[in-house]
Image (spheres, rainbow, N blue to C red):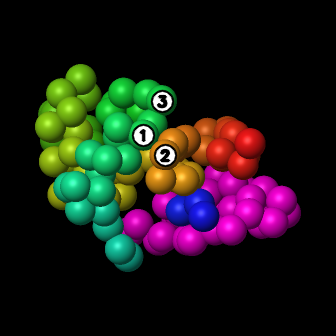
Amino acid sequence: MLTLLHNPRCSKSRQALALLEERGADIRIRRYLDDPLDEKELRALMSRLDADGSALVRTNEAEWKALNADIEDPDQVVRAILDHPKILQRPIADDGQRAVIGRPPEDVLGLLD
């Protein structure tokens, strides 16, 4: 089963969900703004991504810019996302072994292989 960290207001997130549904994927949708990840979940997610922690942050968000946090410091990235879930990049598909950021949305299909 895939977990999709999803924001229904985001077009890329909606596109990723549609692509997964079209292929009949078994999906658990987690609306991370309503049900934020805790620190343990966030750190585990970071370890499953084929990217550094900086890829998890929407650096154009005002909340991120106001923090003056170091994007290269995983602890600061985690703390920022915990305090401001809105800055978490989206969508993210996670199969428990690997996770991918759906930018572009088609990238989530790599977990179906």
Residue 61 pos. (x, y %): 36, 45
Name the N-terminal-most of marks 3 and 2: 3
Residue at the spot of label 1: 48
Residue at the spot of label 2: 97
Q: Residues within 10 Å of mark 2 (few under 14, many from 20)?
A: few
Number of numbered discs overlaid on the protein picture: 3
Snapshot quadrant of residue 23: bottom right
* SS class, disc 1: helix
- Which residue range is magenta in the image? 5-33
* SS class, disc 3: loop
Alpha carbons under labels 3 and 2: distance apart? 11 Å
* Residue in the picture at 35% in, 40% down: 46
Residue 68 pos. (x, y %): 15, 34
Visible in this render: residue 78?
A: yes
- Identify the image quadrant of the N terminus: bottom right
Q: Are marks 1 and 2 in contact (CB under 8 Å)?
A: yes
- When the figure is inspected, residue 29 is found, relative to residue 45, above or below; the finding is below
* Residue in the picture at 24% in, 23% down: 72
- When the figure is inspected, residue 58 is found, relative to residue 81, above or below; the finding is above
Residue at the spot of label 3: 50
Q: Nearer the viewer, residue 8 or 39?
A: 39
Q: Is residue 100 left or right of residue 75?
A: right
Q: Which mark is residue 109?
A: none
Alpha carbons under labels 1 and 2: distance apart? 6 Å
| Amino acid, disc 3 | Asp
